[in-house]
Image (spheres, coloured by chain):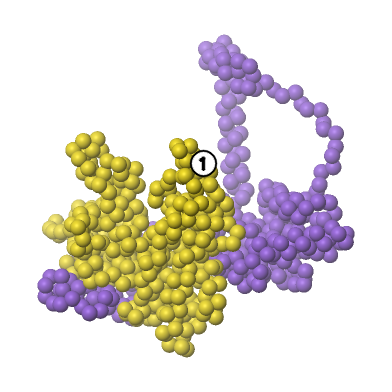
Chain colours: A yellow, B purple
Amino acid sequence: MSDKNKDHGVLYLGIDLGTSRTSVSASNGERETVSSFVGYPKDVVARKLLGTDVLYGDHALEKRLSLNLFRPLSKGVIHTGEEDSDDNMRAAGDLIGEIIRRAKPRKDELVYAVIGAPAEASFTNKEAILKAAREHVDSVMLCSEPFAVAYGLDYLDDVLVIDIGAGTVDLCRMHGTMPEETDQLTLTSGGDFVDAAFTERLQKTCKGATFSTRMVKEAKERFGSVADSMEPAVVHFPVNGKPTSFDVTEDLREACRLIIPPIVEGLGKLIGSFDPEFQDRLKNRVLLAGGGSQIRGLDTAIETHMHEQLGGGKVQRIEEPMYGGANGALKIAHDMPADYWEQLK
Amino acid sequence: MADFRSDSPTSGSLFSPEEIRRLMAAEFDRTVRFGTPMALLEIAVDRLGYLHDLYGEESKFEILNQINELLRSSTRSSDLLGVPMGDRIVAAVTHIERPYAEALAQRLISGTRGLAFDADGRQLRITASIGLAHSESGFDTFAEMVAAADAARRSAIDAGGDRFELFVASAPAEAPPAPTPAPELTTMPGGDMLLNETLRRALAGEGPTDLAQDLLKRVMDEVEERYSSASSDGRTELLERRVAKLGDMLERTETQLRGVLAGSGESGVASVYREVQGLGAEDSGVEQKRDLLKAIFDANLRMQRMTDGEGQAPPSQES
């Protein structure tokens, strides 16, 4: 981006680029979230009907039958080196551009952004995110998503962050310094993993019913719980065209519970490899963040598993799961010295 | 007793809320079987939602924990079971006659008034509303008793809060003769037509001349009633405080804005946020944060050089 005529200050952005949702918190007070879907009209007719070259988020999902639909960050990363990698890169770039537009930057101000990337994203992936972002901002930095969450909450010492996204679950151990490779773990058992397990069970339970991934996800987001006693999850799926009610409470609970063992196992690894004198303190300072943390009872269930497997633990859910990463990234952005931004332009 | 500091309602308790409710129900059954008295108290902090909005979740938890502590210290630990239900606390007290249950409720009300809660340097007065149900009302099931305590709590709130209300079972009495209802135009057969005709006549000056004044009076009464209700539950006072707090923040921001405009090259409005809330020398852990920010910058600079072809891809994946 050219910074010619940009002499009226800097707009700082914190961006949480997620598999399911992309969120931005901006220094002008704007906060926005968009589902991470990008769609392009399939043909000229669709283009004329839709009246636009690209659609985003839920709007794209609604019109998906007329669109080539992309979820550029499925499994937590931008897919490169595959058949549709160019299209994915274009979609990722457009998504970043859209979320920045939604932060309402002025034409006469510079845009500096910090983007949260999965804790163990590969170099190629970080490069891909940077490449897509540089088309829309004047200076950009990446940081690990769970680190951004912890920084935003001022939890920098002896804290474990669990960031449950749709594509990945990131675990990060904070001990006052920059987390290294050994301090971070990325698991693939995120929200999409729960959706897949839930779908598998629904196919057995809801005989004859037809349902889409989106319907499954909506049911999970509405009723998702790991508690022993939960609100009955009754969904309406069509059977031969007729809406039919199914009680999927048990299936949903079982599917949601599947994410707990890998998380506790990961916590065990990060705690077990930490200084023994500080392990207890670390165990009792576990932050639960990300969209997946909204599953009811998850904090208590993780605590219970920690008690069984690690002899104790205390889990605290952050107040704003949807914006925890973006808020933290914004805090990093405006705490970052100005000359650092200049050097990365 | 539950600890409200955590999201987990079971923290600090040996039993889950479901288990405690089951134990309460068993206790209720026992009192019915042996004819011993029992009281159920449902306690709610007045205006807790507004306090939460104004001072944050931490403050809410602190208030609830203080109430929790008060409840613990005001009762017998052997026979009290407390369980959170949303933002309310339910306590079952066994072997207690109604006058003593009322005294306990009053003690809790007075104790709550004496709680000190500090927010933004101000001492806030906390009050509570308590619904009390006693077994002498002859409940058949525990669920009935819980519903009665809940109804009594709502009555206490409706009466202005900072009080307790005892649920009194209403004796079946002969219903008083129903007053003859005033004809409702819209519910009468052909009411819509009649209403339209009445309005048409009123507007044409043919109908009741005071129709418009009557409508206006009703609207004004409704507005006054709503305003009075808002004032009585403290909303106005809280909103005024909130406005004062935001005004203070605005003043500080404007000061910073003037400084930025006068002294720095960054003259944009969005940059002010950085000046007002960015990392300052007085912040806690500033050196540690600067080290972390430098590490992020170094990793990004390295990556930029790699992507620009000035180096090799790093063996480590951290940034």
Q: In the displayed structure, would residue A256 be above or below residue A158?
A: above
Could you say which quadrant of the image residue B28 lies in? bottom right
Q: Residue B216 at x, y = what percent?
A: 57, 27
Amino acid carrying label 1: it is Thr
Locate the C terminus of chain B and report the quarter of the image it occupies: bottom left
Residue B275 occupies quadrant: bottom left
Q: Residue at x 34, y 78 (%)?
A: A179
Residue lying at the far right of the rendered structure: B35
Residue at image mark 1: A244
Q: Position of residue A147 (x, y in %)?
A: 36, 72
Q: Is residue A316 left or right of residue B34?
A: left
- In-front residue for pair B147/B161: B147
The residue at the point 36 percent across, 79 percent down is A183
Residue B266 in view here: no
A51 sits to left or right of A187: left
How far across and down, in percent of the image, does residue A167 sit?
Answer: 35, 62
Left or right of residue B312: residue B273: right
Q: Quadrant of the N terminus of chain B?
A: bottom right
